[in-house]
Image (tube, grey):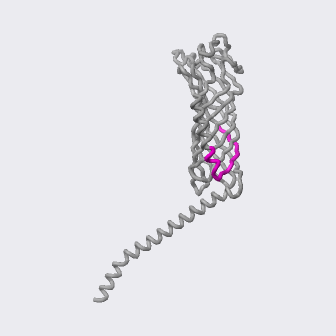
């Protein structure tokens, strides 16, 4: 696992180094969104996606005007996430079957982002893929235990709970550029690797816990997954010369389009002249007779 993390970080550093050497722009912004989350327990448990979560935070991107190179950056975002667990879902009693344990977790996430992209609409529309390594810290938590009819604050225990998590994320979106302003919309799926609960090898005190812990035996794995749709606004900083790169590309594209139009007109004129030549020859032959 350590080797995998080192490899990921090394790749990110290489990508950042390549990108920062090019002519580039810094974009600072804010974003917010809505989505859902769940947990992946092992051994597998009956879970349901929990909707109604939200996220919001600040963003930084560093990207070039060159196509496909993309952007690197980071986010700092607050996220409300969690899971819904149905321990008696296989019960034949409908009332017991519907009972669930729900936990909401308030976290701060820091995704380290790489965004390969390309431009459309005369370099005003940026279409990107979102790839990230994420790090999270769980600030606080609440729970609702319908099995025992209780609810309240979830008190973290050092021997039972992991406040720090990590994972990967992927998604995509579009950004519309208006001068120095950037308006964006996108979606991102967060795939957790770090467990929110310590496994049975590290914690066996379930029977003495209160209603905040519904597990008779702590799951071996318990990462969180989240999916969120967001909208955002960014402001591009940089020298005027950096923005002129986009203008030069637009002018170059316009010149190429004009050249293609002129070439097409010349080709059409040649074809028309070639088609008219036999007719003129026939008329000249008829006139000489």
Q: Residue at x 42, y 73 (%)?
A: 270
Q: Residue at x 67, y 15 (%)?
A: 211
Judge left or right: residue 180 versus residue 95: right
Residue stretch rendered in magenta on the structure = 16-33
* Front residue (pair 15, 264): 15
Would you place residue 137 above or below residue 275 in this image? above
Q: How many marks?
A: 0
Judge left or right: residue 278 versus residue 165: left
Would you place residue 180 above or below residue 73 in this image? below
Quarter of the figure with residue 60 = top right
* Front residue (pair 231, 23): 23
For the N terminus, give its image quadrant.
top right
Extreme residue toward the top, this view: 208
Judge left or right: residue 279 versus residue 144: left
Q: Residue at x 69, y 34 (%)?
A: 78
For the C terminus, give its image quadrant.
bottom left
Quarter of the figure with residue 106 = top right
Extreme residue toward the bottom, this view: 288
Q: Position of residue 97 (x, y in %)?
A: 55, 18
Is residue 25 in the magenta section? yes
* Front residue (pair 159, 37): 159
Q: Residue at x 56, y 65 (%)?
A: 255
Q: Position of residue 125 (x, y in %)?
A: 60, 52
Would you place residue 248 above or below residue 192 in this image? below
Q: Position of residue 276 (x, y in %)?
A: 37, 77
Would you place residue 2 above or below residue 217 in this image? below
Q: Position of residue 207 (x, y in %)?
A: 63, 10
């Amino acid at each position: 696992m350590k080797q995998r993390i080192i490899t990921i970080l090394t790749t990110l550093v290489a990508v950042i180094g390549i990108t920062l050497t090019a002519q580039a722009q810094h974009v600072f912004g804010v974003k917010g969104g809505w989505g859902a989350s769940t947990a992946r327990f092992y051994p597998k448990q009956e879970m349901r996606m929990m909707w109604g979560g939200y996220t919001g935070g600040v963003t930084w991107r560093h990207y070039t005007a060159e196509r496909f190179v993309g952007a690197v950056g980071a986010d700092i975002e607050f996220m409300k996430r969690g899971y819904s667990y149905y321990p008696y879902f296989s019960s034949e009693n409908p009332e017991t079957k519907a009972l669930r344990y729900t936990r909401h977790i308030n976290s701060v996430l820091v995704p380290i982002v790489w965004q390969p992209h390309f431009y459309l609409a005369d370099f005003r529309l940026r279409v990107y893929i979102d790839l990230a390594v994420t790090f999270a810290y769980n600030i606080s938590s609440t729970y609702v235990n319908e099995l025992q009819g209780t609810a309240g604050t979830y008190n973290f225990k050092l021997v039972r709970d992991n406040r720090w998590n990590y994972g990967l994320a992927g998604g995509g979106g579009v950004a519309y550029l208006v001068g120095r302003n950037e308006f964006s919309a996108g979606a991102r799926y967060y795939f957790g690797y770090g467990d929110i609960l310590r496994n049975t090898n590290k914690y066996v005190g379930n029977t003495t816990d209160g209603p905040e812990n519904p597990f008779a035996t702590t799951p071996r794995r318990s990462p969180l997954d989240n999916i969120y749709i967001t909208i955002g606004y960014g402001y591009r900083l940089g020298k005027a010369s950096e923005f002129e790169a986009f203008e030069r590309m637009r002018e170059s594209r316009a010149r190429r389009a004009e050249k293609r139009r002129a070439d097409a007109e010349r080709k059409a004129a040649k074809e028309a002249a070639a088609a008219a030549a036999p007719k003129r020859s026939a008329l000249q032959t008829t006139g000489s007779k």
